[in-house]
Image: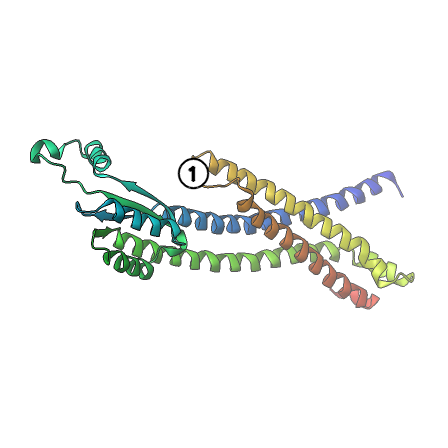
Amino acid sequence: MPSSAWKTRRDSFFNLYFTSTISIAVSLFMVGLVAFLLLWGNSAAKYTKENIVISLVLSDSTTNDDIQRIESYLKNAEFVLKYKYINKEEALAEYVADIGDNPVELLGYNPIKASFEVNLKAEFINNVFLKSLEKKFSNYTFVENVAYQKVMIADFNANIQKISAVLLLFSILLLAITVILINNTIRISIYSKRFVINTMKLVGAKAWFIRRPFLWRFVKNGLIASFLACFGLFGVGYYIQRMDFSLPLYDYRFFVPIIVVVFAVGFLVSFLAALFCINRYIRMKSGDLYFI
């Protein structure tokens, strides 16, 4: 065979698998990006909920025993993330720092109440639980008021549910499109080798012997594409992190699920698509190869 013909065939072979790998990598990148957005949105929602403050405003007649009683309850409650007791002097200092006026100079006494500022775990930030919690704290005679942003919390939870539903539907649609794109890419690649498969079958090669090199090639392409997709996702995470978001984008607990999803989709779809397509050409008669 002339060297120019061999070089042309070698280059076309290289370009075929190179372009298929890049196509699969782009598809997997989009899947990983949606998974990234889902996890990032969940982290953002959790971060926001855990920074919502529930204020337990105490009356001036509250004793030290009362304070220890409620503090003991908050310390052992499973729904409490953290809490902080703010006495009257600290509350006054915060008021003066925020407002700029000192009410003591006008009234002659400190009208600001002592309070507990409580942060709940994210899963407990909902109207039903907060109403029951408000009712429970109202049973304490020394708790004058349970203050939190009811309307904001209700709107926030409703918006989160809508956004999560939209992202979930979008991720399912994108996953289906990705599977179709990867499947078509592999089918086109194997289609160009259908006569090679037929020749191997005619010389007596077993089905497993024919499948093995093709499966290995496309599984390897899927894994390489998965690595490229994850590399791109790390770049996206690095860019977002530089925007000073207070989210754990480089926490292994954040990226491990994304990496698992990308590599699982890349491996399974590549393997199954190649397997079904190769089996089709193995079962096909020689004459039929010219009419597809």
Residue 27 x %, y %:
59, 50
- Judge left or right: residue 32 versus residue 52: right
**Quarter of the image with the C terminus in it:** bottom right
Query: Does residue 232 appear in this view?
Result: yes
Query: Does residue 290 appear in this view?
Result: no
Residue 185 x %, y %:
66, 54
Instruction: Tell which of 92 and 45 is nearer to you.
Output: 92
Q: Residue furthest right?
A: 203
Secondary structure under the numbered disc 1 in the rendered image? loop
- Give the residue drawn at x 7%, y 36%: 107
Residue type at mark 1: give it.
Answer: Phe
Residue 198 x %, y %:
84, 61
User: Mark 1 — residue?
Assistant: 245
Up-down: is 249 above or below 194?
above
- Give the residue drawn at x 82%, y 68%: 285
**Quarter of the image with the N terminus in it:** top right
Residue 4 x %, y %:
83, 39
- Judge left or right: residue 82 versus residue 136: right
- Judge left or right: residue 205 versus residue 157: right
Q: Residues within 10 Å of mark 1 (few under 14, many from 20)?
A: few
**Which picture quadrant has residue 176?**
bottom right
Instruction: Tell which of 247 and 131 is nearer to you.
Output: 131
